[in-house]
Image (cartoon, helix red, strand yellow):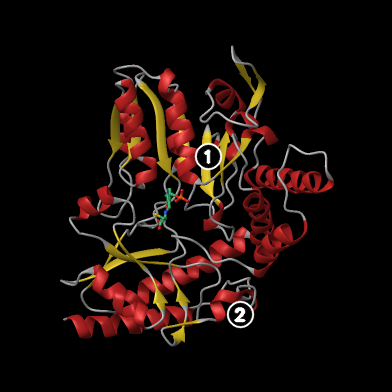
Amino acid sequence: MQKEITMLDVHKIREDFPILKREVNGKPLVYFDNAATSQTPQVVIDTIVEYYSNYNANIHRGVHTLSQVATDAYELARKKVQEHFNAQHIHEIILTSGTTHSINIVATGFTNFLSKGDEVIVSALEHHSNIVPWQMLCDRTGAVLKVIPMNEDGELLMDVYDDLLSDKTKLVFVNHISNALGTINPIEEIIGKAHKVGAAVLIDGAQSCPHVKPDVQALDADFYVASAHKLCGPTGVGLLYGKEEWLNKLPPYQGGGEMIDQVTFEKTTYAGLPHKFEAGTPNICGGIAFGAALDYMNSIGFDNIASYENELLEYGTKKLLEIEGLKIYGTSKNKTSVISFNLENIHPYDVGTIVDKLGIAVRTGHHCAQPIMDFYKIPGTIRASFSFYNTKEEIDALVEAVKKAKMMLS
Ligand code: C6P
Protein backbone atom coordinates (compact mmCIF):
# COMPACT_ATOMS: atom_id res chain seq x y z
CA MET A 1 0.00 0.00 0.00
CA GLN A 2 1.25 3.47 -0.87
CA LYS A 3 2.29 5.47 2.20
CA GLU A 4 0.34 8.70 2.62
CA ILE A 5 2.45 11.81 2.87
CA THR A 6 -0.04 13.96 4.76
CA MET A 7 1.71 16.16 7.31
CA LEU A 8 -1.40 17.85 8.63
CA ASP A 9 -4.01 16.62 11.05
CA VAL A 10 -7.19 17.37 9.14
CA HIS A 11 -9.50 16.40 12.01
CA LYS A 12 -7.74 18.82 14.33
CA ILE A 13 -7.80 21.53 11.65
CA ARG A 14 -11.55 21.08 11.14
CA GLU A 15 -12.03 22.07 14.79
CA ASP A 16 -10.78 25.54 13.82
CA PHE A 17 -13.76 26.11 11.48
CA PRO A 18 -17.08 26.52 13.32
CA ILE A 19 -19.12 26.38 10.10
CA LEU A 20 -17.93 22.84 9.37
CA LYS A 21 -19.96 21.61 12.34
CA ARG A 22 -23.29 22.74 10.87
CA GLU A 23 -25.83 20.78 8.92
CA VAL A 24 -27.40 21.77 5.61
CA ASN A 25 -30.75 20.26 4.66
CA GLY A 26 -30.48 17.89 7.60
CA LYS A 27 -27.08 16.51 6.51
CA PRO A 28 -23.56 17.38 7.67
CA LEU A 29 -22.23 20.22 5.52
CA VAL A 30 -19.71 19.14 2.90
CA TYR A 31 -18.16 22.36 1.63
CA PHE A 32 -16.61 21.91 -1.80
CA ASP A 33 -17.02 25.48 -3.09
CA ASN A 34 -13.62 26.65 -1.85
CA ALA A 35 -12.61 28.17 -5.19
CA ALA A 36 -15.55 30.58 -4.83
CA THR A 37 -14.68 31.47 -1.25
CA SER A 38 -12.94 29.67 1.59
CA GLN A 39 -14.32 29.17 5.08
CA THR A 40 -13.18 31.24 8.05
CA PRO A 41 -11.23 29.86 11.02
CA GLN A 42 -12.12 30.92 14.56
CA VAL A 43 -8.91 32.92 14.90
CA VAL A 44 -9.97 35.18 12.01
CA ILE A 45 -13.52 35.48 13.36
CA ASP A 46 -12.02 36.42 16.75
CA THR A 47 -9.87 39.08 15.10
CA ILE A 48 -12.96 40.65 13.55
CA VAL A 49 -14.91 40.55 16.85
CA GLU A 50 -11.90 41.95 18.74
CA TYR A 51 -11.59 44.86 16.27
CA TYR A 52 -15.24 45.91 16.59
CA SER A 53 -15.34 45.22 20.34
CA ASN A 54 -12.14 47.01 21.30
CA TYR A 55 -10.54 49.36 18.79
CA ASN A 56 -12.90 50.26 15.96
CA ALA A 57 -11.69 53.64 14.65
CA ASN A 58 -10.71 55.32 11.40
CA ILE A 59 -7.03 55.01 10.54
CA HIS A 60 -4.22 57.36 9.48
CA ARG A 61 -6.37 60.29 10.61
CA GLY A 62 -6.65 60.62 14.37
CA VAL A 63 -4.24 61.30 17.20
CA HIS A 64 -6.56 59.55 19.60
CA THR A 65 -5.58 56.19 21.05
CA LEU A 66 -8.11 54.03 19.25
CA SER A 67 -7.16 55.47 15.89
CA GLN A 68 -3.50 54.82 16.59
CA VAL A 69 -4.14 51.24 17.70
CA ALA A 70 -6.25 50.58 14.58
CA THR A 71 -3.64 52.24 12.33
CA ASP A 72 -0.84 50.12 13.82
CA ALA A 73 -2.87 46.93 13.40
CA TYR A 74 -3.73 47.79 9.78
CA GLU A 75 -0.13 48.64 8.90
CA LEU A 76 1.06 45.45 10.63
CA ALA A 77 -1.32 43.53 8.36
CA ARG A 78 0.22 45.25 5.31
CA LYS A 79 3.63 44.13 6.60
CA LYS A 80 2.38 40.54 6.87
CA VAL A 81 1.13 40.71 3.29
CA GLN A 82 4.49 42.10 2.16
CA GLU A 83 6.35 39.28 3.89
CA HIS A 84 3.97 36.62 2.66
CA PHE A 85 4.34 37.64 -0.99
CA ASN A 86 7.97 38.62 -0.53
CA ALA A 87 7.58 42.11 -1.98
CA GLN A 88 10.76 44.16 -1.78
CA HIS A 89 9.05 47.24 -0.29
CA ILE A 90 6.03 47.57 1.96
CA HIS A 91 4.72 50.46 -0.15
CA GLU A 92 4.42 48.05 -3.09
CA ILE A 93 1.44 46.47 -1.29
CA ILE A 94 -1.84 48.26 -2.03
CA LEU A 95 -4.76 46.96 0.02
CA THR A 96 -7.83 46.88 -2.22
CA SER A 97 -11.31 45.37 -2.05
CA GLY A 98 -10.10 42.26 -3.90
CA THR A 99 -8.77 40.83 -7.14
CA THR A 100 -11.35 42.55 -9.37
CA HIS A 101 -10.62 45.96 -7.85
CA SER A 102 -6.86 45.40 -8.16
CA ILE A 103 -7.07 44.48 -11.85
CA ASN A 104 -9.25 47.51 -12.57
CA ILE A 105 -6.70 49.82 -10.92
CA VAL A 106 -4.01 48.57 -13.30
CA ALA A 107 -6.20 48.36 -16.41
CA THR A 108 -7.47 51.90 -15.90
CA GLY A 109 -4.00 53.15 -15.08
CA PHE A 110 -2.62 51.94 -18.40
CA THR A 111 -5.03 54.09 -20.41
CA ASN A 112 -2.43 56.78 -21.03
CA PHE A 113 0.33 54.28 -21.82
CA LEU A 114 -1.28 52.48 -24.75
CA SER A 115 -1.99 53.68 -28.26
CA LYS A 116 -3.80 52.40 -31.31
CA GLY A 117 -2.11 49.29 -32.66
CA ASP A 118 -0.43 48.28 -29.40
CA GLU A 119 -1.19 44.73 -28.37
CA VAL A 120 -2.12 43.14 -25.07
CA ILE A 121 -2.22 39.40 -24.46
CA VAL A 122 -4.65 37.48 -22.29
CA SER A 123 -5.10 33.71 -21.94
CA ALA A 124 -8.02 31.50 -22.89
CA LEU A 125 -8.20 30.36 -19.27
CA GLU A 126 -9.12 33.69 -17.69
CA HIS A 127 -11.87 34.62 -15.29
CA HIS A 128 -14.07 37.48 -16.58
CA SER A 129 -12.31 39.77 -14.09
CA ASN A 130 -9.12 39.32 -16.06
CA ILE A 131 -10.77 39.81 -19.47
CA VAL A 132 -13.37 42.56 -19.28
CA PRO A 133 -11.20 45.34 -17.71
CA TRP A 134 -8.64 44.78 -20.50
CA GLN A 135 -11.31 44.85 -23.20
CA MET A 136 -12.47 48.15 -21.73
CA LEU A 137 -8.85 49.36 -21.84
CA CYS A 138 -8.61 48.33 -25.50
CA ASP A 139 -11.86 50.18 -26.27
CA ARG A 140 -10.44 53.33 -24.69
CA THR A 141 -7.06 53.17 -26.40
CA GLY A 142 -7.44 51.29 -29.69
CA ALA A 143 -5.07 48.56 -28.48
CA VAL A 144 -5.72 45.02 -29.73
CA LEU A 145 -6.50 42.06 -27.46
CA LYS A 146 -4.79 38.77 -28.39
CA VAL A 147 -5.54 35.42 -26.79
CA ILE A 148 -3.22 32.50 -25.93
CA PRO A 149 -5.37 29.49 -26.86
CA MET A 150 -5.71 26.26 -24.89
CA ASN A 151 -5.87 22.54 -25.67
CA GLU A 152 -8.44 19.89 -24.64
CA ASP A 153 -6.59 19.28 -21.35
CA GLY A 154 -7.01 22.94 -20.46
CA GLU A 155 -3.33 23.84 -20.96
CA LEU A 156 -2.10 26.97 -22.69
CA LEU A 157 -0.46 26.56 -26.10
CA MET A 158 2.90 28.07 -25.34
CA ASP A 159 4.19 27.90 -28.91
CA VAL A 160 1.29 30.13 -29.97
CA TYR A 161 2.20 32.48 -27.12
CA ASP A 162 5.71 32.71 -28.60
CA ASP A 163 4.19 33.70 -31.95
CA LEU A 164 1.88 36.30 -30.38
CA LEU A 165 4.71 38.14 -28.63
CA SER A 166 6.29 41.02 -30.53
CA ASP A 167 7.55 44.53 -29.96
CA LYS A 168 3.89 45.62 -30.20
CA THR A 169 3.08 43.65 -27.02
CA LYS A 170 2.74 46.03 -24.09
CA LEU A 171 0.99 43.92 -21.47
CA VAL A 172 0.36 40.27 -20.69
CA PHE A 173 -2.17 39.14 -18.08
CA VAL A 174 -2.78 35.55 -17.08
CA ASN A 175 -3.97 33.72 -14.05
CA HIS A 176 -1.57 31.64 -12.01
CA ILE A 177 -4.24 28.93 -11.59
CA SER A 178 -7.49 28.63 -13.54
CA ASN A 179 -10.60 28.85 -11.37
CA ALA A 180 -12.73 26.77 -13.73
CA LEU A 181 -10.30 23.91 -14.46
CA GLY A 182 -7.55 24.11 -11.84
CA THR A 183 -4.72 24.25 -14.41
CA ILE A 184 -1.48 25.69 -13.03
CA ASN A 185 -0.07 27.94 -15.71
CA PRO A 186 3.68 28.21 -16.45
CA ILE A 187 3.85 31.78 -15.22
CA GLU A 188 7.64 31.94 -14.82
CA GLU A 189 7.99 31.18 -18.53
CA ILE A 190 5.16 33.56 -19.46
CA ILE A 191 6.73 36.40 -17.46
CA GLY A 192 10.27 35.76 -18.75
CA LYS A 193 9.19 35.76 -22.39
CA ALA A 194 7.02 38.88 -22.00
CA HIS A 195 9.91 40.77 -20.44
CA LYS A 196 12.14 39.88 -23.40
CA VAL A 197 9.84 41.97 -25.64
CA GLY A 198 9.50 44.72 -23.02
CA ALA A 199 5.92 43.91 -21.94
CA ALA A 200 4.66 44.18 -18.36
CA VAL A 201 2.88 41.20 -16.78
CA LEU A 202 -0.04 41.03 -14.37
CA ILE A 203 -0.62 37.70 -12.63
CA ASP A 204 -4.11 37.01 -11.32
CA GLY A 205 -3.36 35.01 -8.18
CA ALA A 206 -6.95 34.70 -6.95
CA GLN A 207 -6.85 30.91 -7.21
CA SER A 208 -3.17 30.27 -6.48
CA CYS A 209 -2.95 31.99 -3.10
CA PRO A 210 -5.00 29.34 -1.26
CA HIS A 211 -2.58 26.64 -2.45
CA VAL A 212 0.88 28.15 -2.87
CA LYS A 213 2.97 30.95 -1.40
CA PRO A 214 3.94 33.19 -4.33
CA ASP A 215 7.28 34.97 -4.30
CA VAL A 216 6.72 38.05 -6.44
CA GLN A 217 10.42 38.91 -6.61
CA ALA A 218 11.49 35.42 -7.69
CA LEU A 219 8.67 35.40 -10.26
CA ASP A 220 9.65 38.90 -11.38
CA ALA A 221 5.92 39.71 -11.76
CA ASP A 222 5.16 43.36 -12.47
CA PHE A 223 1.78 43.04 -10.79
CA TYR A 224 0.29 40.26 -8.69
CA VAL A 225 -3.30 40.41 -7.43
CA ALA A 226 -5.38 38.31 -5.03
CA SER A 227 -8.40 38.28 -2.69
CA ALA A 228 -8.26 37.52 1.05
CA HIS A 229 -11.54 35.61 1.03
CA LYS A 230 -10.00 32.76 -0.97
CA LEU A 231 -7.42 32.14 1.75
CA CYS A 232 -9.44 32.03 4.94
CA GLY A 233 -9.79 35.81 5.23
CA PRO A 234 -12.89 38.00 4.93
CA THR A 235 -14.56 39.24 1.74
CA GLY A 236 -14.04 42.80 0.52
CA VAL A 237 -10.26 42.94 0.91
CA GLY A 238 -7.33 41.89 -1.23
CA LEU A 239 -4.05 43.06 -2.60
CA LEU A 240 -2.45 44.71 -5.53
CA TYR A 241 1.26 44.09 -5.56
CA GLY A 242 3.07 46.25 -8.10
CA LYS A 243 6.73 46.94 -8.67
CA GLU A 244 7.55 50.35 -7.26
CA GLU A 245 8.53 51.76 -10.67
CA TRP A 246 5.16 50.77 -12.17
CA LEU A 247 3.09 52.01 -9.24
CA ASN A 248 4.90 55.32 -9.37
CA LYS A 249 4.14 55.65 -13.07
CA LEU A 250 0.44 54.73 -12.91
CA PRO A 251 -2.05 57.50 -12.06
CA PRO A 252 -4.39 57.17 -9.06
CA TYR A 253 -7.55 55.17 -9.69
CA GLN A 254 -9.90 57.12 -7.45
CA GLY A 255 -9.73 60.58 -5.95
CA GLY A 256 -10.65 61.28 -2.33
CA GLY A 257 -9.36 61.43 1.20
CA GLU A 258 -6.02 59.89 2.13
CA MET A 259 -4.65 59.70 -1.42
CA ILE A 260 -3.58 63.35 -1.44
CA ASP A 261 -0.59 65.38 -0.42
CA GLN A 262 -1.98 68.93 -0.82
CA VAL A 263 -5.43 70.02 -2.03
CA THR A 264 -6.31 73.52 -3.23
CA PHE A 265 -9.03 74.53 -5.67
CA GLU A 266 -6.31 75.22 -8.21
CA LYS A 267 -4.35 71.99 -7.92
CA THR A 268 -4.05 68.75 -6.01
CA THR A 269 -0.88 66.78 -5.47
CA TYR A 270 -1.00 63.13 -4.59
CA ALA A 271 0.32 61.11 -1.67
CA GLY A 272 3.13 58.65 -2.22
CA LEU A 273 2.78 54.88 -2.30
CA PRO A 274 0.77 53.03 -1.16
CA HIS A 275 -1.76 55.74 -0.22
CA LYS A 276 -1.99 57.14 -3.77
CA PHE A 277 -4.14 54.10 -4.61
CA GLU A 278 -6.08 53.93 -1.33
CA ALA A 279 -8.65 56.73 -1.51
CA GLY A 280 -11.33 56.84 1.19
CA THR A 281 -11.74 54.81 4.36
CA PRO A 282 -10.51 51.31 3.62
CA ASN A 283 -11.84 47.99 4.87
CA ILE A 284 -9.88 48.39 8.10
CA CYS A 285 -11.21 45.36 9.92
CA GLY A 286 -10.92 43.28 6.73
CA GLY A 287 -7.28 44.27 6.26
CA ILE A 288 -6.41 43.33 9.84
CA ALA A 289 -8.28 40.02 9.48
CA PHE A 290 -6.41 39.38 6.20
CA GLY A 291 -3.19 39.51 8.21
CA ALA A 292 -4.64 37.05 10.75
CA ALA A 293 -5.67 34.70 7.91
CA LEU A 294 -2.13 34.73 6.49
CA ASP A 295 -0.75 33.89 9.96
CA TYR A 296 -3.20 31.01 10.19
CA MET A 297 -2.41 29.59 6.73
CA ASN A 298 1.33 29.90 7.39
CA SER A 299 0.96 28.09 10.72
CA ILE A 300 -0.37 25.10 8.77
CA GLY A 301 2.30 25.51 6.10
CA PHE A 302 1.83 25.76 2.34
CA ASP A 303 3.89 22.63 1.62
CA ASN A 304 1.59 20.65 3.88
CA ILE A 305 -1.47 22.25 2.30
CA ALA A 306 -0.29 21.48 -1.25
CA SER A 307 0.64 17.86 -0.58
CA TYR A 308 -2.61 17.12 1.26
CA GLU A 309 -4.75 18.82 -1.38
CA ASN A 310 -2.94 16.83 -4.08
CA GLU A 311 -3.91 13.67 -2.24
CA LEU A 312 -7.54 14.84 -2.24
CA LEU A 313 -7.32 15.71 -5.94
CA GLU A 314 -5.95 12.29 -6.86
CA TYR A 315 -8.49 10.49 -4.72
CA GLY A 316 -11.44 12.57 -5.96
CA THR A 317 -10.42 12.23 -9.60
CA LYS A 318 -10.16 8.45 -9.33
CA LYS A 319 -13.45 8.04 -7.45
CA LEU A 320 -15.47 10.37 -9.68
CA LEU A 321 -14.15 8.75 -12.86
CA GLU A 322 -15.56 5.42 -11.64
CA ILE A 323 -19.02 6.88 -12.38
CA GLU A 324 -20.00 5.90 -15.90
CA GLY A 325 -20.72 8.84 -18.19
CA LEU A 326 -18.83 11.34 -16.00
CA LYS A 327 -16.37 13.56 -17.83
CA ILE A 328 -13.76 15.75 -16.18
CA TYR A 329 -12.81 19.06 -17.83
CA GLY A 330 -9.28 20.21 -17.06
CA THR A 331 -6.97 17.21 -17.20
CA SER A 332 -3.57 18.86 -17.12
CA LYS A 333 -0.96 16.98 -15.08
CA ASN A 334 -0.12 20.30 -13.55
CA LYS A 335 -3.31 21.18 -11.73
CA THR A 336 -4.62 21.98 -8.29
CA SER A 337 -7.51 20.60 -6.25
CA VAL A 338 -10.36 21.65 -8.55
CA ILE A 339 -12.47 19.05 -10.35
CA SER A 340 -14.86 20.36 -13.00
CA PHE A 341 -17.13 17.69 -14.41
CA ASN A 342 -20.40 16.84 -16.10
CA LEU A 343 -22.65 13.83 -16.37
CA GLU A 344 -23.57 12.81 -19.89
CA ASN A 345 -26.80 14.46 -21.09
CA ILE A 346 -27.53 16.02 -17.69
CA HIS A 347 -27.47 19.76 -16.99
CA PRO A 348 -24.91 20.70 -14.30
CA TYR A 349 -27.48 22.86 -12.49
CA ASP A 350 -29.73 19.83 -11.90
CA VAL A 351 -26.87 17.86 -10.37
CA GLY A 352 -25.88 20.84 -8.19
CA THR A 353 -29.44 21.15 -6.88
CA ILE A 354 -29.68 17.48 -5.92
CA VAL A 355 -26.29 17.33 -4.22
CA ASP A 356 -27.19 20.48 -2.27
CA LYS A 357 -30.25 18.67 -0.91
CA LEU A 358 -27.73 16.14 0.45
CA GLY A 359 -25.75 18.88 2.22
CA ILE A 360 -22.97 19.21 -0.37
CA ALA A 361 -21.96 22.65 -1.67
CA VAL A 362 -20.47 22.69 -5.18
CA ARG A 363 -20.57 25.45 -7.76
CA THR A 364 -22.40 24.90 -11.04
CA GLY A 365 -22.38 27.05 -14.17
CA HIS A 366 -19.74 28.84 -16.20
CA HIS A 367 -17.70 29.95 -13.16
CA CYS A 368 -17.27 33.45 -14.65
CA ALA A 369 -15.17 31.87 -17.39
CA GLN A 370 -17.56 31.68 -20.36
CA PRO A 371 -14.82 31.40 -23.01
CA ILE A 372 -13.70 28.10 -21.41
CA MET A 373 -17.25 26.74 -21.59
CA ASP A 374 -17.50 27.89 -25.23
CA PHE A 375 -14.26 26.03 -25.99
CA TYR A 376 -15.75 22.76 -24.68
CA LYS A 377 -19.19 23.64 -26.16
CA ILE A 378 -20.94 23.11 -22.83
CA PRO A 379 -23.23 25.40 -20.80
CA GLY A 380 -21.19 24.89 -17.65
CA THR A 381 -19.80 22.30 -15.26
CA ILE A 382 -20.21 21.05 -11.73
CA ARG A 383 -17.11 22.25 -9.89
CA ALA A 384 -15.88 20.61 -6.68
CA SER A 385 -12.95 22.51 -5.23
CA PHE A 386 -11.14 21.01 -2.25
CA SER A 387 -9.36 22.74 0.60
CA PHE A 388 -6.98 21.52 3.29
CA TYR A 389 -9.91 21.12 5.73
CA ASN A 390 -11.77 18.67 3.48
CA THR A 391 -11.56 14.89 3.86
CA LYS A 392 -11.69 11.77 1.72
CA GLU A 393 -14.90 10.79 3.54
CA GLU A 394 -16.46 13.99 2.22
CA ILE A 395 -15.34 13.05 -1.29
CA ASP A 396 -17.03 9.68 -0.80
CA ALA A 397 -20.22 11.54 0.14
CA LEU A 398 -19.94 13.62 -3.05
CA VAL A 399 -19.47 10.51 -5.18
CA GLU A 400 -22.54 8.89 -3.65
CA ALA A 401 -24.56 12.08 -4.14
CA VAL A 402 -23.54 12.35 -7.79
CA LYS A 403 -24.51 8.71 -8.34
CA LYS A 404 -27.89 9.42 -6.78
CA ALA A 405 -28.33 12.51 -8.97
CA LYS A 406 -27.46 10.45 -12.03
CA MET A 407 -30.05 7.83 -11.11
CA MET A 408 -32.74 10.44 -10.54
CA LEU A 409 -32.02 12.44 -13.68
CA SER A 410 -31.32 9.70 -16.25
N1 C6P B 1 -13.58 33.43 -8.66
C1 C6P B 1 -14.99 31.48 -8.43
O1 C6P B 1 -15.99 30.90 -8.00
P1 C6P B 1 -13.00 38.60 -6.57
O2 C6P B 1 -14.46 38.35 -6.86
O3 C6P B 1 -12.60 39.99 -6.99
O4 C6P B 1 -12.59 38.25 -5.18
O5 C6P B 1 -12.19 37.57 -7.50
C2 C6P B 1 -12.41 37.53 -8.88
C3 C6P B 1 -11.62 36.43 -9.50
C4 C6P B 1 -10.58 36.75 -10.36
N2 C6P B 1 -9.79 35.81 -10.90
C5 C6P B 1 -9.99 34.50 -10.65
C6 C6P B 1 -9.05 33.49 -11.26
C7 C6P B 1 -11.03 34.11 -9.81
O6 C6P B 1 -11.21 32.81 -9.57
C8 C6P B 1 -11.89 35.09 -9.24
C9 C6P B 1 -13.05 34.70 -8.39
C10 C6P B 1 -14.68 32.87 -7.90
O7 C6P B 1 -14.25 30.97 -9.25
C11 C6P B 1 -15.90 33.74 -7.85
S1 C6P B 1 -16.51 34.17 -9.43
Q: Residue furthest front?
A: 265
The answer to the question of whether label 2 and label 1 lie on touching residues, with beta carbons closer than 8 A, is no
Crowding near pointer 2: few (<14 within 10 Å), some, many (20+)?
few
Q: Is mark 2 within 8 Å of ligand 1?
A: no
> Which residue, given by chain and number where applicable, does mark 1 sit on?
224
Q: Residue at x 21, y 51 (%)?
A: 374
In the drawing, does residue 152 fall left or right of residue 298? Answer: left
Label 2 secondary element: helix
Q: Quadrant of the C terminus?
A: bottom left
Residue 245 in percent (x, y) is at 59, 23
For residue 11, which numbered disc appears in the image? 2
Q: Earlier in the sequence, mark 2 or mark 1?
A: 2
Q: Residue at x 70, y 48 (%)?
A: 77
Q: Residue at x 21, y 50 (%)?
A: 375
Crowding near pointer 1: few (<14 within 10 Å), some, many (20+)?
many
Q: Pick the residue in front: 72 or 327.
A: 72
Which amino acid type corresponds to the residue marked 2 in the rendered image? His
Residue 206 in percent (x, y) is at 48, 50
Which amino acid type corresponds to the residue marked 1 in the rendered image? Tyr
Q: Pick the residue in front: 322 or 224.
A: 224
Label 1 secondary element: strand
